[in-house]
Amino acid sequence: MARWGMTIDLDRCTGCGNCMAACHQENNLAAVGAAETQENRAFHWLRVLREVSGEEANLEVTYKPVLCVQCDNPPCVRVCPVHATYRNEEGIVGQVYSRCIGCRYCMAACPYNAKVFNWYEPEWPGDLQRKANPDVSLRPKGVVEKCTFCHHRVIRAREQARAEEREIRDGEVTTACAESCPAQAIVFGDLDDPDSRVSRLARSPRAYRPHADLGTRPKVVYLAQQE
Amino acid sequence: MAESGTRTPGWIYALQVASVAVMWVFVLGISGWILHLNRLSQRLHDVPSATVAIPIVAIPVFLTGAAVLTYVFVGLQRGARAAGDESGEAR
Amino acid sequence: MSDEASHETRPAHGLDAVDVSDLLRSVERPGSGFRVATTLLLLVLLGAWVIFGRQLLYGLGVTGLNQPVAWGFYIVNFVIFIGISHAGTLISAILRLSNAEWRRPITRMAEVITVVVLGIGGFHPVLDLGRPDRMLNIFSAGRLQSPLLWDVSAITAYFMASTVYLYIPLIPDIALLRDRGARPQWLYKFMAWGWRDTPRQRKVLERAVSILMVLVIPIAVSVHTVISYIFAMTLQPGWHSTIFGPYFVVGAIFSGIAALMMVMIVLRKVFRLERYLKQIHFDNLSKLLLIMSLFWFYFTFSEFLTAFFGNEPSEMRVFFYKFSGPYAPWFWGMVVCNFLIPVVVLSFRRLRTISGIFIASTAVVIGMWLERLNIVVPSLANPRLPYPSGFYVPSLVEWAMFVGGIATFMLGFVLFARFFPLISVWELQEGREQAVRETMERVESYLPDPRPRES
């Protein structure tokens, strides 16, 4: 059984935002519009955060794509009152949209603020709804949703592999964000396979896991030059 | 204090019994629900050990509440009947 | 506790027939005020629900909640209302248990507060749901591992116990109303459960009350502990704290006593109960309030000092958000309302008048509400990652439901006063008939035994 994980090389990231756009398209994220964004209700499963440091003369800007880190010990799953969020056997933390009652306890409990809420009936303006990805369900209003590590792609690859009676090959599955990254900063794969690219990168001395001190055991690993 | 006006008609007595019964339905319903959730967590292997504590504490509390209410109801009825039989006993 | 009120055995103290009809006036001769008050409150409530209809229609977007601040007024009000419910049953149980004789005219009101407010508070999480239509999922697929479900069971248990605890000591008064021919007769006949004041019935009643008061105290403590666990069980800065359980319980009792005194003062004015709710009752309760204020300060100080001294970056962000950041007015307002005002007003006998106590109690209720706001919002507004801080401005819908909650509270009291006596008549009577003698015997039992006579 695979244990899916991801590395994000912050030294490569240019902050172009392609991953955000690809994620929106792949996962049928609703468009909330400018007014709601002003209200702090911007709707992303993956966000590129900007960190500004340094003196006024020579500012240094670094970018950091942030998504659900798919904890192996997820605080959100522990608090859900109705089994609506769960960690599956491959380590992906999922959300059952049809069972979620919208109490938002998981959002309050998530140290990474990875979950988003449908404050209104979601909208897909123009012909976006017609062009929706058929592999990903559309979410109703009033439920919490989150990054699924493009779980539908994993399922498709697994079925393909099963039909051909083999294991999933390293690099066969990748997420929309990793696929779209022009700097190839994002790598997706099986962390339990010691030879996979993602495992090798995760063992790099540049690797760190966000807030590993909380004991959440995240499976998104950042790579950055340590100072 | 025993006056003829305090005689309770039959339908009111039935209502009183029904209200105590409703209390029991409520309490047993809650207990059954808690046990159902406990079983659910065992079936899903979702930290069943953690869900044992609540039934142990909550169910006796609910049962005690209903039991006290029933005790009062039965006690008051018996007291009223005894006072009715030998009306000299009431102060 | 002192029993100065009933210390003297002059027959002038206690109840006579005039007093009884005085206490039952609100039931027997309600007047038009009740109808006016009920109508007004129902209108307010209706307005609140109409405004709330927008949320049902469009979703939670009509509130001021947003991305990092996922919880707001609904949860704050949930915590404060449940906290106030501790006034009641807990205080009345403690006073009964400790044989505090001055409790007699107070307990009933305290118990009514509990039942009414618990109903309101317990409903708030439902308002907060994004999908209230799926609420029944809690019954079919609930997770007892979630602190929210601990809440559901604890609040249900407390509601059941406190309703029974309100009802059982009410039975003799209902029977009194029944015998005096109050209307609707069938209601009093139904609720009196055949009470005829025989010694045997009295024994049953007293035994039931003493079981319940022992049962109710741990339940009440557990309820607010568990509510604090909603926050403390997460890893969030400012929430993940071991003292949250006792801190919330202390705050709950604190706000509960304050709310109880506010209610007592208002009802005393409205129903002219000055002869029954005397200065001594307020004096004793305000001593309790003063102690709780000091407790509250001690807990707050410990909580914030550990956060400050630890100097952990994410904790510090929350700390400074409250201490000197956007929430500074609410934070310092809370300190003034919960500590400065009550301590100053209640420490000096000259300020401890009825109006002084009313001001202090109101300040405490507001201050405790601010404390809940200070707990819920700043921690959510300051996530760990390098996110910008969030903001939260409650919307009209949230304010409407807040007002609606307060209107429901008042409505509960109006309706209760219309049908049942607000002061326990039989317990006051018992106070006159037995308690004076019992208290004297008790006091004698505290004194050194008489020296054996030398023969």
Image: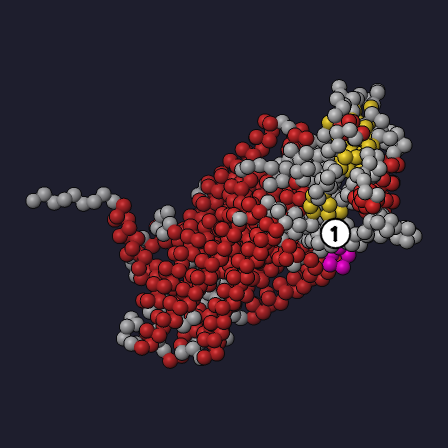
Q: Does the magenta stretch include residue C59?
A: yes
Vertical arrangement, residue C342 with respect to residue C419, above or below? above
Q: Nearer the viewer, residue B40 or C169?
A: B40
Question: What's under tag 1, amino acid-wise?
Answer: Tyr
On the rendered structure, is A149 left or right of C187?
Answer: right
Give the overall secondary structure of the magenta segment.
helix
Please report the residue visible at 79 percent of the width from the left and 35 percent of the height from the top. Answer: A189
Q: Nearer the viewer, residue A195 or A142?
A: A195
Q: Does the magenta stretch include residue A174?
A: no
Give me the chain letter of mark 1: A
Please report the residue visible at 73 percent of the width from the left and 39 percent of the height from the top. Answer: A1
Which stretch appears magenta? Answer: C55-60
Residue C392 in view, yes or no: no
**Outermost residue to the left:** C455
* Residue B46 x, y percent position in the rendering: 62, 46
Q: Nearer the viewer, residue C298 or A189?
A: A189
Vertical arrangement, residue C323 with respect to residue C26, above or below? above
Please name the colour scheme applied to the rendered image: secondary structure
* Residue C193 x, y percent position in the rendering: 43, 71
Please report the residue visible at 75 percent of the width from the left and 19 percent of the height from the top. Answer: A227
On the rendered structure, is C174 left or right of C10?
Answer: right
Q: Nearer the viewer, residue A88 or A54?
A: A88
Residue B3 in view, yes or no: yes
* Residue C164 x, y percent position in the rendering: 47, 61
* Among the 4 quarters of the image, the one containing residue A147: top right
* Among the 4 quarters of the image, the one containing residue B35: bottom right
Please report the residue visible at 44 percent of the width from the left and 61 percent of the height from the top. Answer: B67
The quadrant in which the C terminus of chain C is found is top left
| Secondary structure beneath label 1 | loop
Q: Mark 1 points at which residue?
A: A97
